[in-house]
Image: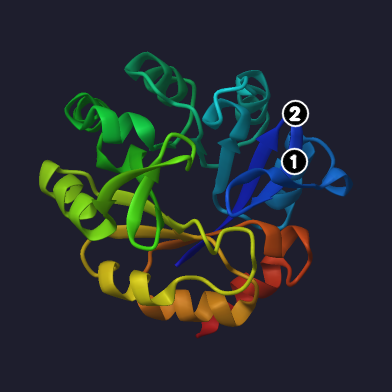
Amino acid sequence: MELIPAIDIMEGQVVRLTKGDENAVTRYASFGTPLEAALFWCSQGADFLHIVDLDAALGRGSNRELVKLILDSLDMPVQIGGGIRSLESARDLLDSGVDRIILGSMAMKAPDRTLKLIEEYGENRVAVALDHRQGHVLWKGWKESTGRTLETILSDFMTMGFEWFLVTNADRDGTMEGPDIDTYSKISGKTSIMASGGIGSIRDLVQLKDSGVKASIIGKALYEQRFTLPEARSYVEVI
C-alpha cells in the first residue's frame, strides 16, 4: 500500500478542512509554502504527492501557478485534484507533467467525455473521486448529493473502463477519528482504491492495508504530527 502525503491549497496556503467545510479551515504556516511543504514530504521519503486546489474545487479561484511551480521543482510523481472541469484543463495538467488527475464533478457530469482521457493517456493517469456521505456520492465541492449510491456509481465507472478511484467518507474527512474501514473492505477487491479521510494513527493505516486498498492519502495526521511519514512507512511495510 502506498502512503501519499496530501497538500491542500487555499489562498496560496497549506490548509486542511474538516468534513469538507470551507469555514472549518486549519492553516499550517509552520510547513511553509505549498512548495516548501512538497519539498519537505519529498525529503521524508514520499514516493507520491497528492495536491488539491481547494479554491478551484470551491469555484472561488485557482492556485494553478503554484501547482505548476511544484511540478517544475520536484522530480517525483504527483497527482492533482480540485476544479478540473474540462477536457482542456485535464489535458493541460497531464501534458505538463502531472502523473494522475483526480476528477469529481466532471466525471459525474460527463463520464463519456471523461473516458476520452483514459483512451488518450491510459487508465493509470485518471482517477475518479467518489466522495460520499452515508453511502451517497457527493459532487460540486461536496455541496450536493448525486442521489446515487457509492457502489452503484463505482460499478458504472468500472464497467466503462475506469480503474482508479479516490474514495472519501466526507463525515470522516479531517477528523482523525478513523477511516471508513467497512466501506473499503467491501469495495477494494473490485478495483484500485485510494483511501482518504479519518486517518489518525498508524493503526488506521494497518487496517487500511488489511482492507486491500492500493493507497492511503494522509493529511491532517501528518500535519498534526500524530506520526511521521518515515514511521508510518517503516511500520506498514513490515506488517
Q: Position of residue 89 (x, y in %)?
A: 42, 18
Front residue of 111 and 145:
145
Query: Which image quadrant for residue 199?
Result: bottom right
Marks 2 and 1 close (CB-CB < 8 Å): no
Q: Position of residue 55 (x, y in %)?
A: 62, 28
Q: Residues within 10 Å of mark 1 (few under 14, many from 20)?
A: many
Front residue of 120 and 27:
27
**Mark 1 = which residue?**
14
SS for callout 2: loop
Q: Which mark is on residue 12?
A: 2
Quadrant assignment for the N terminus: bottom left
Q: Label 2 to label 1, Cα distance in Å?
A: 7 Å
User: Three-letter amino acid code at disc 2?
Assistant: Gly
Looking at the image, residue 191 lies above or below residue 32: below
The residue lying at 21 percent from left, 64 percent from top is 190
Query: Which image quadrant for residue 27?
Result: top right
Looking at the image, residue 233 lies above or below residue 169: below
User: Three-letter amino acid code at disc 1?
Assistant: Val
Does residue 212 appear anywhere in the picture?
no
SS for callout 1: strand
The residue lying at 49 percent from left, 37 percent from top is 141
The residue lying at 50 percent from left, 85 percent from top is 239
Looking at the image, residue 173 lies above or below residue 80: below
The residue lying at 40 percent from left, 81 percent from top is 210
Query: Which image quadrant for residue 136?
Result: bottom left
Give the mark count. Answer: 2
Q: Position of residue 201 (x, y in %)?
A: 64, 76
Q: Residues within 10 Å of mark 2 (few under 14, many from 20)?
A: some
